[in-house]
Image (cartoon, grey):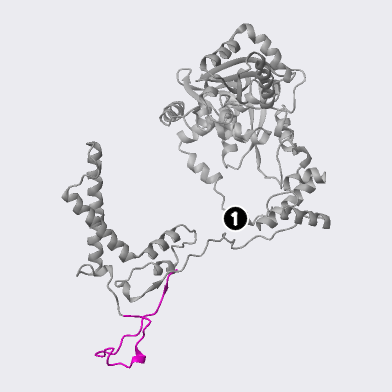
Amino acid sequence: MDICRRPPRPPPRGTTDHDRPSSSVDHRFPSPTPRASDALPLPLYLTNAVFFTLFFSVAYYLLHRWRDKIRNSTPLHVVTLSEIAAIVSLIASFIYLLGFFGIDFVQSFISRASHDAWDLDDPQHHRNFLIDDDPRRTPRIAVPPTPPTPPKLANPEPIISTLSSEEDEEIVKLVVEGTIPSYSLESKLGDCKRAASIRREALQRMTGRSLQGLPLEGLDYESILGQCCEMPVGYVQIPVGIAGPLLLDGFEYSVPMATTEGCLVASTNRGCKAIYASGGATSILLRDAMTRAPVVRFASAKRASELKFFLEDPNNFETLGVVFNRSSRFSRLQGIHCSMAGKNLYMRFSCSTGDAMGMNMVSKGVQNVLDFLQDDFPDMDVIGISGNFCSDKKPAAVNWIEGRGKSVVCEAIIKEEVVKKVLKTNVAALVELNMLKNLTGSAVAGALGGYNAHASNIVSAIFIATGQDPAQNVESSNCITMLEPVNDGKDLHISVSMPSIEVGTVGGGTQLASQSACLNLIGVKGANKESPGSNSRLLATIVAGAVLAGELSLLSAIASGQLVKSHMKYNRSSKDVTKVAS
């Protein structure tokens, strides 16, 4: 902030410097020197207004003149008398403004604007930057701004140590000092739980922040080593609710949903109730194929096209399938779709992967084929095992059109009385809303695979509960919801078409205790030995069935005007959760 010196007291009226003793004259403050504000014999605010207006008006004029010269191909150095006068006026007004405000003021203003330390509610802030009517009264001394400091917590939580021995204390000190890398604790100690505890304590000391609310006990850290998570310090608790029973293909399923969004489970459960009361839903599995698309480069587009024709030749498919299928007894190559961009070739391999989601399986098969192709195409430069033509964890039209993982359609006919009594709306209102919201509204928004109300809500909740990859919710939520009246307009036909549901019942997070229990609840835990792949396919149809229920219920809530009311009731807690013990 600027430090203002107190001006000397004015002399008595009628007294001059010659009338006073020389010792009474304060030489620290000499007589005022001419200032920029003396340029015109006007009040200070009028002088400022004149020069501000002059500066911006002249700048505007010159910019327009230069624009016209550029358009007319006139050299910029050729100037007229009016332009010379404008340039002189611009320089004069700029000198005035610079002289009035001062370089120190400008630098201080910019420096302060770049710091988080500004507090607009602080009266000191406003006092420092007020411009007096006469700035010559109080000379200012600029002080460099104080560097910003990390924000301090008003009531920091105490750091609670979980260490059990002095040996662990020494290891924590070594981790904090950087002598022992945090990532190597599991291999050095041979105890994953102990490694997580030591890493957690070291993290608290290095950051000065408590992890008291993050649980440490209750997780099998051995099960996640080298598979699910690196450098763990605890785990996050997400509540799991049950929607159902979902009557699908003649069987009842209780659907686990891990979520922190109020109303989601209740709404999906209401949709399941409406489907059950109407006789259940039916699902159809259209396709089951995971994809991986490497990108390779050649010296010419002609050479790249030769590989494209080779891969798409039916006479070569059997040979390529034998090479690909060596990666696993469950992988079976189904097809290769190629696309070129100049001399770059993208090869989209599709294969079945049993009950696994299959990304690693298909990647190994692709690597086998690439190694095999090097013999006939030694000039092939493999740029990457994944060229984004797959396409994994990104919105992509290729997944929406061609499918990826499991492609499922699920449908149901909801009776008129159920629409009125359970869903609290009518068939005509639902059909109109779906057309204007899910179809027309999504088209206006330029949606890609998002022609639905909230499919990703249900997909994400089931994915988290059952140990799927949450990031694959991006393509797995591709869905178009269709509604139309049937039986003379009395009943409602609803369907969801989901071309790229990526799920598995083995590998990854499916082996964790909580997620495994949720899979067991559905009846799809682990691999199906009698019919490999049937468990993961059943899980995909259940996901689609739950999405059908969620779509039906949310659209009904919107059509009946109950959406806001229900969220205010179930999704607005007044409890202070920070005071609840972990």
Q: Nearer the viewer, residue 235 or 363?
A: 363
Residue 389 forms part of the magenta stretch: no
- Which amino acid, by three-letter code, is at mark 1? Asp
270 relative to 165, above or below: above
Secondary structure at numbered mark 1 = loop
Bounds of the magenta segment: 1-30
The dominant secondary structure in magenta is loop
Q: Residue furthest left?
A: 81
**Residue 291 screen position, x and y as percent:** 62, 22
28 relative to 464, above or below: below
Q: Nearer the viewer, residue 120 or 314?
A: 314
Q: Which residue is mark 1?
A: 576
Q: Residue furthest top?
A: 315
Tell me the quarter of the picture where residue 138 sits. Answer: bottom left
Residue 10 forms part of the magenta stretch: yes
**Residue 500 screen position, x and y as percent:** 58, 24
Residue drawn 63% across the image and 61% down it: 156
511 relative to 361, above or below: below
**Residue 504 screen position, x and y as percent:** 68, 27
Q: Nearer the viewer, residue 200 or 90?
A: 90
Residue drawn 22% across the image and 48% down it: 61
**Residue 539 screen position, x and y as percent:** 66, 26
